[in-house]
């Protein structure tokens, strides 16, 4: 069921009235950027905690919007207040998924960049726990490649990039897999359609570099920090596709996916097919963080203290 409200251009708005014009550049050319953000019910009570909100706004404003030369009429603090108002209006008290979208509106002539009309909206949905977190999913190396930095950079979280994700995902699903891994143009491992990838090789936690055609994931950063905190050596380096077939452990990491073990890839069982020891430690620590154990600057309270972003 759809939520009752969205937040559109400064106002909590009924779902049915939440519209972007058919003539907008967002609609015609996919000219929008967004963030996927999670809020979790706190371990110690009734609050809802938004995870790493300031980092999501940093990526939205300083990476995605910056590259597209996009300006919107709302500051991160105003969008943060919008998220909180929307969660209140939709009466979301449990785990939630939030999307903040900045879009180019109807153009009067050719695109000029910073002066072009824009808008922003927010969606917030309740999100049930992922049932596959304990058991793992089936993956495959896709024949679709991630775009290059010089075509449409995976570094920016542009809506149009998700056409690449969509074809790769549908292809994998039709072949009976859950989520694919995409290679970059150099034939090295990049990421999943909406999540970064991690391997455990000889006890070390390995993930592709930020120059390997990936989105610079916030969860990726959290996982790298957790690896270090747990005493696991971490490596950011180029990854060959066959390394996926010989890794002791494999998992996806992303705001939506959380820390998702992969139990099989292209018919190769990963480890003994169950969640690996390193993955399990990172996953359980991740959930402690998002439910309240993270540093205060990573958590924004929805029903408690005043909003920070
Ligand atoms: C293509 C892609 N890679 C990686 C990620 C993971 O990024 P984050 O951890 O910031 O959600 C996402 C999700 O936003 C994504 O869409």
Image (spheres, helix red, strand yellow):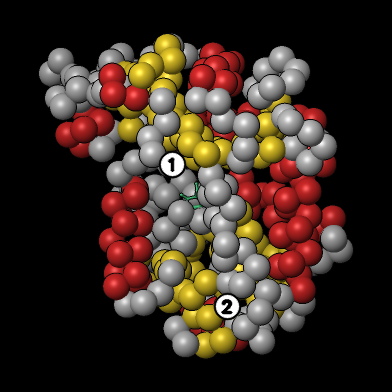
Between 52 and 293, the one lying in front of the other is: 293
Between 119 and 212, the one lying in front of the other is: 119
**Residue 52, visible in the rendered structure:** no
Compared across the picture, whether 91 is left or right of 65 comes to right
Give the number of marks: 2
Q: Name the secondary structure under disc 1.
A: loop
Residue 238 horizontal/vertical position (percent): 56, 68
Compared across the picture, whether 40 is left or right of 156 comes to right
Residue 97 horizontal/vertical position (percent): 52, 39
Q: Residues within 10 Å of mark 2 (few under 14, many from 20)?
A: many
Establish if 273 lies above or below 226: below
Q: Name the secondary structure under disc 2.
A: strand
Q: Which residue is mark 1?
A: 156
Establish if 110 lies above or below 224: above
Mark 1 or 2 closer to N-term? 1
For image coordinates 71% across by 59% down, the residue present is 283
Between 295 and 283, the one lying in front of the other is: 283
For image coordinates 45% across by 83% down, the residue present is 266
Establish if 177 lies above or below 92: below
Quadrant in which the C terminus is drawn: top right
Ligand 1 is within 8 Å of the C-beta of the residue at disc 2: no
For image coordinates 77% across by 74% down, the residue present is 277
For image coordinates 52% across by 39% down, the residue present is 126
Between 62 and 279, the one lying in front of the other is: 279
Q: Which residue is mark 2?
A: 263
Residue 212 horizontal/vertical position (percent): 50, 60
């Amino acid at each position: 069921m759809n939520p009752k409200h969205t937040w559109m251009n400064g106002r909590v708005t009924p779902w049915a009235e939440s519209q972007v014009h058919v003539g907008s550049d967002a609609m015609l050319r996919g000219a929008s950027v967004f963030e996927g953000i999670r809020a979790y019910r706190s371990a110690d009570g009734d609050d809802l905690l938004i995870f790493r909100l300031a980092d999501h706004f940093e990526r939205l404003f300083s990476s995605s919007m910056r590259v597209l030369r996009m300006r919107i009429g709302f500051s991160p603090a105003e969008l943060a207040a919008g998220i909180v108002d929307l969660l209140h209006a939709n009466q979301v008290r449990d785990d939630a998924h939030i999307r903040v979208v900045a879009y180019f509106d109807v153009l009067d002539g050719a695109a000029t960049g910073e002066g072009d009309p824009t808008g922003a909206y927010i969606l917030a949905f309740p999100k049930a726990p992922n049932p596959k977190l304990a058991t793992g999913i089936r993956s495959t190396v896709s024949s679709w490649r991630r775009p290059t930095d010089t075509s449409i950079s995976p570094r920016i979280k542009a809506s149009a990039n998700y056409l690449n994700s969509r074809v790769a995902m549908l292809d994998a699903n039709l072949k009976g897999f859950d989520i694919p891994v995409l290679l970059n143009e150099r034939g090295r491992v990049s990421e999943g359609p909406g999540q970064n990838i991690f391997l455990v090789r000889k006890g070390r936690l390995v993930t592709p570099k930020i120059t390997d055609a990936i989105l610079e994931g916030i969860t990726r950063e959290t996982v790298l920090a957790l690896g270090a905190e747990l005493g696991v050596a971490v490596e950011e380096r180029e990854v060959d596709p066959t390394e996926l077939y010989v890794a002791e452990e494999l998992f996806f990491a992303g705001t939506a996916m959380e820390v998702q073990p992969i139990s099989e890839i292209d018919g190769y069982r990963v480890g003994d097919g169950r969640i690996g020891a390193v993955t399990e430690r990172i996953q359980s620590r991740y959930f402690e963080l998002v439910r309240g154990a993270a540093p205060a600057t990573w958590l924004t309270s929805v029903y408690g203290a005043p909003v920070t972003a």
